Amino acid sequence: MSKSKPKNLIVFISILLLIGCQSGPKVKQQNEAFNQETINLGWDQLQQNTIENLRAKSFGEANLNIKQMMAFAADDNSKWEYIRMALVSMPNDLAEGLVDLALEKSFIKNNRPEQFAFVRVLTQIEAYEKSMVLLNDLIDQEQTVEYVYWRARLHLLMKQEAKAEIDYLWLLDKAPKNTDYLSQYVTLLNFLGRNDEAMALLVDNEGDVDLLFRQIILLVQQDQDDSAKEKLTQLKALTNEAELTVEQKLEIGELSYWLEDYDYAMSLLQSVKSGEHINKAKLLMANVLVKQQQYDRAAVMYHQVQNGPEVHAIPAYQLEIELYREQGDMDAALKTADAALQMFKKDPDILYSRALLHAQNNNIPAVEADLNEILSQNPDNADAMNALGYSWADNDMKLDLAYDYIMRAHELKPNDKAILDSVGWIYYKKGELEKAEKYLRMAIENNTRDTESYQHLITVLEAQGDSIGADEIRKKALELFPSFTD
């Protein structure tokens, strides 16, 4: 006996047959409308299925959904835009395969703006080489500023600084006063160590809020704080005549905090009311309150942010931990760290903060437990390796293993000042004083934020019998840190 067809399918087929038997313009319009409605019903269902599968991380099902959506999309830009949004939520390898499939569709092949949209997708999923090939093909067809600007940024992601500079110079030739081009090019010059060229460009464009802001940042990086504060006064006058974006308020507010203009920082940050940005503003305001020694108010603000999204809550816990540590209240600091780890299980940032507290309490087993947990999650975490190796070295424990950990961290982050200090210290502990001095001198070079490397270098120089050298370092440290003691 044959199986009977479902009733709804019979009705659907009957409607199609009825429409097919009719003729005339009116019927044709009705037919097209019906077909479009059917397609829309299918598209809406695919959208819902895709969302549900992405949320459930059922990427195999989502992969099939997106392929089906491509079949529906035809030449509808809005449908392709939705497909691209779904793609960046997929694992990179699956997304890259789907992009390849999309680029074979005739609508995409014959549409440069659509191809450029997929260049951006490929960049987001870190398929840089493939993104560059497609982008260069577009530029060969039409060299627009939009395409070249994206290529300059893509060159930077691929660490092709010389090629990026060629593109930025081409862009600036087209639009010498474009703030975005100038800002990106200055960042590149700064990265390349060509700070004089960067500063010259910025000085020529002091009338722009963003470029004057970048000039002040560059002065701070060069430890020219007095000049930076003078320029901040100029920036404040400029911002009085401009309507700042939320991002500008946050950036200039943070800069004012670092330059100790706490009142101006607070006035800017208090004006941030956006829900998306309010937590970052509160974190910065709490830091200002700490500098103003309003510790209770700062703690309250940290607590408010801790109830927000994880991206802000974790730094809020770390800052509260640091607040108590600086006050010498180690019990409160550890209690806060424990509470944070109850909320964010085995979070590496909180574990690291707690490990430093344990180190200060000389609780080496607890230090080892927290840092080893971080390394079990990420064996190449240079900071955790360095902290564990340093803790052993400082307590004259496991010196060979400490050396291995510290040198591996140095290999991963060769210019990190804290790790350079550890390299010097482990050599000191192993009795290799010349090597210790070499690395500790590297650690104090251009280091105006931390005193420990200066203390270590003085210890090493005195161990070598170089009291004159030790006195020179002591004098230099006192100039940078008036309360310095060794």
Image (spheres, rainbow, N blue to C red):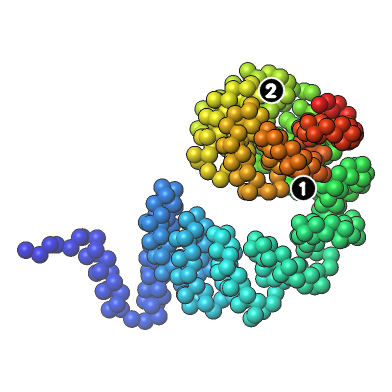
Q: Say which amino acid is labelled 1.
A: Gln
First along the sequence among labels 2 and 1: 1
- Which image quadrant: the N terminus? bottom left
Above-or-below relation of 121 to 105: above
Where residue 359 appears, x then y in whole percent? 63, 26
Instruction: Tell me the CA gap for discs 2 and 1.
Output: 31 Å
Q: Which residue is mark 1?
A: 248
Above-or-below relation of 49 to 18: above
Q: Nearer the viewer, residue 238 or 76?
A: 238
* Side of 314 relative to 254 (left or right): left
Where residue 339 appears, x then y in whole percent? 56, 25
**Residue 458 seen in this snapshot:** no
Q: Nearer the viewer, residue 141 or 34?
A: 141
Query: What residue sits 67% from the left and 71% below the top?
Result: 147
Within the image, what quadrant is residue 33 found in?
Answer: bottom left
Q: Say which amino acid is labelled 2.
A: Tyr
Q: Badge 2: how crowded within 10 Å, few (<14), some, or many (20+)?
A: some
Seen as rendered, the residue at the extreme left is: 1
What secondary structure is found at the residue carrying circle 1?
helix
Q: Which residue is mark 2?
A: 324
**Residue 8 seen in this snapshot:** yes
Q: Nearer the viewer, residue 166 or 277?
A: 166
